[in-house]
Image (tube, rainbow, N blue to C red):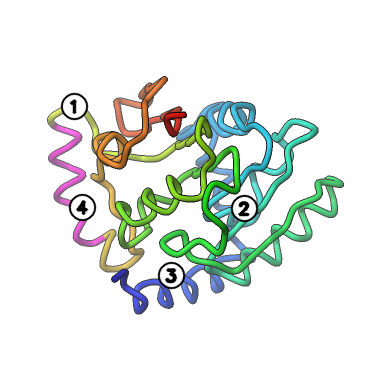
């Protein structure tokens, strides 16, 4: 059973941050992600679920024809996403929901996308099981996440800092999503790292 207390704490944390989140992210996202947010959006096909859509920073990058659903545990973040969607003329269904218990039918979407969210989800394995469940056969899982570095010194630094980042921000710095993606039945088509191995993008599919 996933940690509902942590989910509630995350919702309150991001409700408080919602008004300042974009200003803070604008300063670091180009350095952290480069163009990988746009890359992720361009891999989406058909009915697309964005997990932890936050303030909707990916919305302008989706191609025309994508039918988009966005979930987040924070109402404050969803309100900002709603305003961004209206400003960009981007139709989207926004739902307050938990990635560990998706309010969608089995095999109902073509894409599940997550950008910088697996680091805070309490039970990543459960979230990936849910992603697998709601994807149609042949559907795509697209991840862009900060992860455990593949460079020894950086990994040691991440492990030293992680207890504080988890305690104060529920942010796990040294998770490794790739083995979990494989363990949950996905076939990995593409994997790449940047920024000394601390950021990883993954394109995987649910086998047909």
Q: Which residues are magenta?
A: 153-164
Answer with mark 4 or mark 1, whichever residue precedes in sequence: 1
Dot 4, crowdedness within 10 Å: few (<14), some or many (≥20)? some
Q: Secondary structure at mark 3?
A: helix
Give the residue displayed 50% in from the left and 35% down from the top: 137
Q: Is residue 6 left or right of residue 65?
A: left
Measured from the top left, where is residue 122 in percent x and y? 32, 62
Tell me the residue at 29%/71% (across/down). Answer: 1
Q: Quadrant of residue 120?
A: bottom left
| Position in image of residue 26 (x %, y %) | 59, 44
Which circle, 2 or 1, is nearer the viewer? Answer: 1
Rendered residue at 30%/27% (across/down): 197
For label 3, the residue is 10
Residue bearing mark 1: 151
| Residue 63 placement, left or right of 86 | left
N-term mark: 2 or 4: 2
Secondary structure beneath dot 2 equals helix
Indicate whether residue 116 is drawn in magenta.
no
Label 4 element class? helix
Q: Nearer the viewer, residue 130 or 40?
A: 130
Q: Kindly check if marks 2 and 4 are in contact, taking CB atoms under 8 A apart as contact.
A: no
Residue under label 4: 161
Who's the residue at 62% across and 64% down the image? 77
Identify the mark at residue 23; answer none if there is no mark.
Answer: 2
């Amino acid at each position: 059973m996933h940690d509902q207390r942590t989910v509630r704490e995350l919702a309150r944390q991001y409700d408080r941050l919602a008004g300042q989140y974009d200003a803070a992210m604008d300063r670091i996202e180009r350095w952290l992600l480069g163009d990988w947010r746009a890359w992720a959006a361009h891999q989406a096909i058909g009915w697309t679920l964005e997990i932890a859509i936050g303030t909707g920073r990916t919305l302008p990058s989706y191609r025309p024809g994508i039918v988009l659903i966005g979930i987040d545990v924070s109402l404050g973040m969803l309100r900002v996403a709603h305003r961004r969607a209206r400003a960009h003329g981007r139709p989207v269904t926004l739902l307050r929901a938990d990635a560990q218990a998706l309010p969608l039918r089995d095999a109902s979407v073509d894409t599940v996308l997550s950008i910088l969210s697996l680091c805070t989800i309490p039970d990543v394995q459960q979230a990936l099981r849910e992603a697998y469940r709601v994807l149609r056969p042949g559907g795509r899982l697209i991840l862009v996440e900060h992860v455990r570095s593949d460079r020894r010194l950086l990994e040691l630094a991440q492990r030293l800092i992680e207890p504080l980042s988890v305690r104060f921000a529920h942010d796990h710095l040294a998770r490794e999503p790739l083995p979990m993606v494989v363990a949950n039945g996905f076939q990995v088509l593409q994997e790449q790292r940047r920024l000394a191995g601390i950021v990883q993008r993954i394109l995987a599919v649910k086998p047909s």
